[in-house]
Image: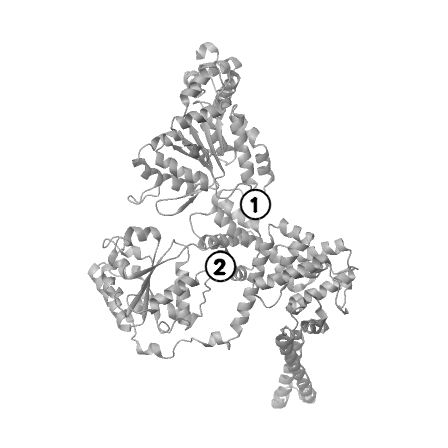
Amino acid sequence: MTFDLKKTKIYKAVSFSKLLIFGSLRTWRNLFLTIGIFSLVISIFSYMLPQLGPVALLNYAPPLLGLACIFVALGFSFLFFEIFYGLYLKYPRIEDNENVAEFLDFDSAMVMDETLTASRLMKEESVSTNALLMALASYEPAVTIFTRIGIDQGQLRTELEKSFNLNWSLRGFSFFGGMPNLSADMADLLNDVSGLRQSHASERLTMLDLLTSLFDHNAIFQKIMIDRGLDKNDLSSLAIWYESNVKYLEDRKRFWTLENLLRQPPIGVGWIYGYPWFLSHYAADVTRQFQEKHLEVKLIGRQKIVDQMEQTLSRAGENNILLVGEPGVGKRTVIMGFTQMIAEGKALSALNYKRVFELNVPLITSSSKDVSEIQGMLISLLNEAVKAGNIILIIEDLHNFIGALGGMGRVDISQMLLPYLESNEFQVIATTDPVSFHKYIENRAEITKVFEKIDVSESSEPDTLAIIEELVPTLEDKNKILLGYDAIKTVIESSDKYIHTVPFPEKAIDLLTETVSHATSQGKRLITSQDVYDVITLKTQIPLGNIGTDEKEKLTNLESEMHRDIIGQDEAVKAITDTMQRLRAGLTKRGKPAGVFLFVGPTGVGKTQTAKILAKTYFGSKDKMIRFDMSEYQDPESLDRFLGSLRINEPGQLASAVRDNPFSVILLDELEKADKNILNIFLAVFDEGQMTDVFGRKVNFEQNIIIATSNAAADMIRDMVNQGLDPSTQKEKVIDQMVSGHYFSPEFLNRFDEIVIFHPLTQEQLYQVAELLISALVERLRAEGYLFKPTTEVIDYISKVGFDPQFGARPMQRAVQDKLESVIARKILEATVSKGTEFGLTLDEIK
């Protein structure tokens, strides 16, 4: 491999460009033509209409005419040079395949020329990647690219000039001789660049290829990228996007290419078909919209589906299509892409004369209250389509028109459609979703036999990224903003991770548009990943992005904050807080819930209370805890309630609750009492972080902490308590008892991140529990204006009467209610205590 820029033809374009004083042929051309045309107009005006102008103007007419001829000639000369420069010098043939410089496009050649200049000014013995970075930071066409990455080019250039002790304004032309010496890192970079060119099948090397390879070979640039949350793969994606846009724009200009000239629609063929009056009134002519409004659809990742549609609709016989896919996967885009092929004459010859209409069934059904009149109108419309002979009809959401007649504007058109669907003169493209297909269509053999079912699955992440990249220029132009590539990347990743009610690509598109709207409402012009995180947080209440001071303090002090309300149980609190800190730092493993814990221990020791305090302390509210009493789901009939049922068209309590609260604590109280089928469902949830509901939709648990409580092995725990043993130190025995007692299987227990044995509370801890409960009572009374001050004797008494060896501290709330609240309520009614005056209670009063 060699690198000799001076021996390449592209270097002529680089040198020619630098010799233009004002930097552009276009500037000179416009200047000369403006002066020339202006002079020509004035001189003609002076000759032809002397009576309208001052006589003195005639004296200047000949010089002005001469001036016009000179400057117009110069303008056209520069136009010639511009064409020569733009079409020949900037796009020379590749002659030496061994010279890497031969493959440089104009911009990358300019950058490499600037690199040689920078290296000389930096007094390097061999050209390094630092010089390349400096050149890229100083090359004006790279401004948009750097801004897209999230780098302020001016600031970067200033920082680099200070780092390299370089005054870039002193640079001159790079009249270097011979082949430059390359440093080892620069030679490796050029090798990588050559590999990149081959990987994306490009003839030329671009600036972005240089940037992408620079990531691996320059520590300064690598740190800049990592600080912005980007990596080499992101640079590669940006390079592909940039080059595909350039190629697309260039291809559109080349109307003379063979691809654009071939497969044009047959002229006049459509004239032999009839004019469809009913269709023109009750359906939209989609083909005409493409032809007249010059609509354009770019299919990404869907070409195989379009090809399958093309093959099906062009063959003889019953050839109708039913597209089945979730709302938001792009069924309509597929249909529009297929229609565009027909409108542009790029479909198979049998389809190029077809007209695609979108049937507006709701408009037809709402046009009359008489069912027979509606049926007659539909039959007339279908007869008209058959008579025309070249109609493809789009019926969206076919399931809405199959079933009982009437009601809510709904009419069953399936029986009317069937004879026409069997005709060779009429075709239908219908859409539905998987749930509706199975519920309304699949069991109707007479319908399924006349349709070719084509599944439209959710777009992949790479395809969704390409779709988003297609939308970005339009959004930027409309809103006068710039989307950083980190924001584009975060839209894809965040919509995949946090939005589970809508499939790709719709959820990514929705998130992108919401982010743009949110950022522009705040006056922002550069949209970054933090703006995406802000929108996700608003939608889901999941804290994302930069960790603020308040949140950082909350996370740091989470353990101590939880201990204020949870007495003892250090093991449980430590396990929970460690999980929350990993979750917020982004270190939790994808494909699993944020945390899965089994709390086992005597009743009344704080298992449920721990889950409540976590929801309040970190998630912000006790409402962020989704609680299920699993004793309510002990029989097979309860499965429909918990998991959902197609029979009653209910999604299920679990799926609905998690979709409504994707960032929350899920508490499964007394899990051992649940039906075994429910435990099997949770076996998959704990392992994979998701489940599929009865309608085939995914429910994601990746942002949930799942806490299950159990009284399994309660007899063993009670025996340990009676013997004065601490069950938390006997975990293995407790687990063995749960398995041997057939409460849980070993594989089920292995799915938990941690099995926490809650130990009985000591007398000192019971005193602290009593303090907490009484303090809560004091605050409630204070809110009403009563100042209750409990004594240590009262607290100690409540801690003793409110404890039961078998039920722990659970009876303590009842003791506070019976012994304190009742007495205080009686005193308030008797007016023996008054607002604003401090009072207390004696032991005699509460015993």
Residue bearing the label numbered 1: 545
Q: Quadrant of residue 302?
A: bottom left
Instruction: Say above or below: 692 vs 130.
Output: above
Identify the residue shown where x is 45% and y is 38%.
686
Label 2: how many Cα within 10 Å (few below 14, some 14–19, many 20+): some
Pick whichever, 332 or 636, lies toward us: 636
Image location (x, y in percent) of residue 378: 25, 64
Pick whichever, 739 or 128, lies toward us: 739
Task: Report if residue 413 is visible in the image.
Answer: no
Instruction: Say above or below: 703 vs 809.
Output: below
Pick whichever, 340 or 821, lies toward us: 340
Label 1: how many Cα within 10 Å (few below 14, some 14–19, many 20+): some
Image location (x, y in percent) of residue 66: 68, 87
Q: Secondary structure at mark 2?
A: helix
Identify the residue shown where x is 53% and y is 73%.
253
The amino acid marked with disc number 1 is Gly
Image location (x, y in percent) of residue 464: 48, 56
Task: Report if residue 743 is visible in the image.
Answer: yes
Residue bearing the label numbered 2: 467
The amino acid marked with disc number 2 is Ile
Q: Where's the C terminus, which quadrant?
A: top left
Q: Residue 613, labelled with which disc?
A: none
Q: Quadrant of residue 681?
A: top left
